[in-house]
Amino acid sequence: MFWYIKFFKVPELRKDGTVKSKTYTQYTIKTTISVTTDLGDVFYPRDLDLVSCLYVPDVNDKVDPGRAMTIPLLLSWKKGNRCLNVAHHFRLPKSESLPLMCLCISSEPIYLQNDINLVNLKNSFLLGIRSDAIGPELGKSSSGMVGREFRLLHNRTLRIWEESGDSIARHIWDSGIMIVAYFWDCYETNWQNGRSLSEILSKRPKTLRVLELGSGCGVVGIAFAQLVKKASVLLTDLPEAMPILQHNVSKAKGLAAQSTLQSQVLDWENDEALSQLLDVQKFDLILVSDCTYNTNSIPSLVKVLEKLVIGCRPHIFLATKTRHDSENLFFDLMKEKGIEVQNREEFSRSKNWEHLPSSGLIPKIEIYTFYQ
């Protein structure tokens, strides 16, 4: 569905020793990027113009990345590329200290947020990226994290940090973006679109209790907390996902002032942990996104969902991009447990995929509502 600019290598700051000057010091920031899918299994198959900019971040960590530090560097991604080396050269007077910097790469000459609504997602397909802080010491950026920013309603911003590198774990995936856009669309139309969600919100208790399974970076749960007032949102995943998830939750709490955000380890194979969670609280809404691609985990996921619906009968929202037919196992098992599909929405975009090798599947994302 979408293409992602990704850092294959964390941006690294070096002093350029080949340039000798008494008045200024020459520096270089180097990195390697790719333009690929959420799984990193296909690379962008056409020529593409990109822009790389160095910014001095806002000291208050506001949404605005700050002032541009250098003239934008034009990059040229060519058909057949798998990666592209980037080298930003800049100089500073010897009297000036190195500031904190961030490197932003997108298709625009300025760093723009991605409008995360259904209309704009149908028209734009490339998601830009920014590094974590670089400097003032020489070497790599201060962490292995990279950020993506999305513009929500009323100029509110969703900022999500991911891991860098070519691993597919703890990255934003297509279905997560699309279900957030779906929630936005429901909200903007006063819930006329997405009647299932409208019914949930109209009948909800004072505080809507929301649980997300397999949160990853947390994009879905965090966006929901920013869009919906008076929601208590618990994001869960395996222990290895906790560092990036907790980081995003801590950064987002100030932006979801009318809702609460928490993160917690939840292993679908750990029956005792799930029982302890359900002893403490019940949920009105369950969010699941991009969790059916690994068919080995589907029986465990269904088992967890079956236990969650006992007694409180929450609605379940599932977003998925079907990657292989074996994922149908999820729907078969859900039906066996008496958890029926109440509603289905489909979103597909083929314009930017026409030159890709055929996988036998049309790129589409489906959003299901289940209810027992």
Image: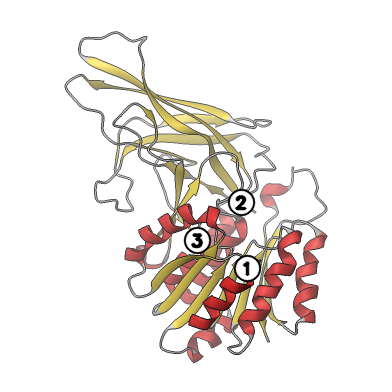
How far, Cα to Cα, is label 2 from label 1? 34 Å
Res 67 quadrant in image: top left
- For this orientation, the residue located farthest to the front is 272
| Disc 2: CA contacts within 10 A as few (<14), some (14-19) or many (>=20) | many
Residue 106 locus on image (x, y percent): 48, 41
| Disc 3: CA contacts within 10 A as few (<14), some (14-19) or many (>=20) | many
Residue 160: mark: none
Q: How is the protein colored in the picture? A: secondary structure
Residue 165 locus on image (x, y percent): 55, 39
Residue 73 locus on image (x, y percent): 43, 29
27 sits left or right of 4 in the view: left
Name the front one of labels 3 and 1: 1
Residue name at image x 49 percent, y 85 percent: 201
317 sits left or right of 211 in the view: right
Residue name at image x 42 percent, y 84 percent: 207
| Disc 1: CA contacts within 10 A as few (<14), some (14-19) or many (>=20) | few
Judge whether 101 appears above or below 354 on screen.
Answer: above
Sequence-wise, the earlier of marks 2 and 1 is: 2
Residue holding disc 2:
2
Q: Which amino acid does label 1 sit on?
A: Asn
Name the front one of labels 3 and 2: 3
Name the front one of labels 2 and 1: 1
Name the secondary structure under disc 1.
loop
Judge whether 201 appears above or below 365 on screen.
Answer: below
For the N terminus, the quadrant is bottom right
How far, Cα to Cα, is label 3 from label 1? 21 Å
Residue holding disc 1:
270
For the C terminus, the quadrant is bottom right
Q: What residue type is labelled 3?
A: Gly
Q: What residue type is labelled 2?
A: Phe
Name the secondary structure under disc 2.
loop
Residue holding disc 3:
218
